[in-house]
Amino acid sequence: MKKKKLLIMILIILMIVVPFSLTLGRYVLENIKSYIMETNNFFFSSDKLKEHGVIYEVNNWGGANDFYIQFELNNHKNNILTSKGDIEYSIVLDYDENDTICTIDNDSGVIYENEKTDSFEVTVTPRRVFDDEESVNLTITAKSSVPYEKELSATYVITVGKRGISYQITDSANTPYMMFSITNALDTYVVRTAFDGNNPGKTLTTAEYLALSPENQAKCASALITLSWDPSEVIIDTTSNIVTSGIATTTTSTYNGIAYISSITFPVDILSSTEVRFYKWDVTQNYSYPAVQSTPIVTFSAS
């Protein structure tokens, strides 16, 4: 009986130790491999793709229009340490072809020693119309082949926030402002305030909307957009048409004893694009979304 208990204990210990040892062994080997590459002045990295993979979740897709992803591959660790020699690479996209068509402007090439960086754009084109909160997955894998093999990857979970409506933030470090861009691909209007038997929520075609009086047209909108933000981080350009036109409603918050606009709600027309300028308190920040930031500095909602 004692021997049987001892055998069971040994088996339990082995079940715990062996998988841990294998995992530890792989971790050690991977780090040794990375060390050897770096001591031989080999650096292959990316601003988005990571050696052991990374997951990005974005929720600003409209589900009916193209979605774009920008990323870079480079051959340096920092401003001083750069690879000695050229690096050959290839890029593979993995996605569900029933839902989307994904293309890249270049799926292979060479990062030349003196050029240091290659830039890419992936285009995600829907094959069907997606509903709110539906998602598609795309995995981007870049692999160097010469002089060493190294793999970088990232998986994007792209979710429809509001069908037909997409947005992005364009920014760069050391600029005083950023642009919040909204694209509305919807071709219908929705009654917002009741009139002549038309109740809120009723959908109107463009022809039906154009047949209304200007007074009743003002009671409809293709979509209502609400943006909200912390005025201690960014402030809206109060001279923009969105603010001065009288079509928007706003709320304020106090920062440093001053009342700043902290949210704004406004209608957008069908098949239109709208840009809103925001000034940054910290100009060194880059608030680009989803290209840089995983969470937008300005919160978006649409109805």
Image (tube, rainbow, N blue to C red):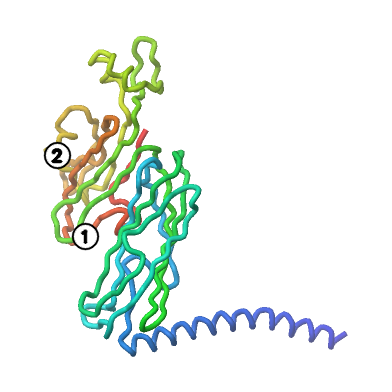
Q: Residue furthest left?
A: 239
Vertical placement of residue 126 versus 213, above or below: below
| Count of labels in the image | 2
Occupied quadrant, residue 110: bottom left
Residue at x 50%, y 48% (from the top left corner): 98
Give the labeled residue for mark 1: 285
Mark 2, Cα crowd under 10 Å, few <14 / some 14-19 / many 20+, is some
Name the residue nearer the viewer: 54 or 259.
54
**Label 2 secondary element:** loop
Give how far across and how far down residue 287 sits, in percent.
25, 55
Give how far across and how far down residue 162 sits, in percent.
39, 39
Dot 2 amino acid type:
Thr
Q: Residue furthest right?
A: 1
- The image's mark for residue 238 is 2
For this view, does 213 lie left or right of residue 145?
left
Query: Rounded to the nearest whole Å, what is the CA distance between mark 1 and mark 2?
Result: 21 Å
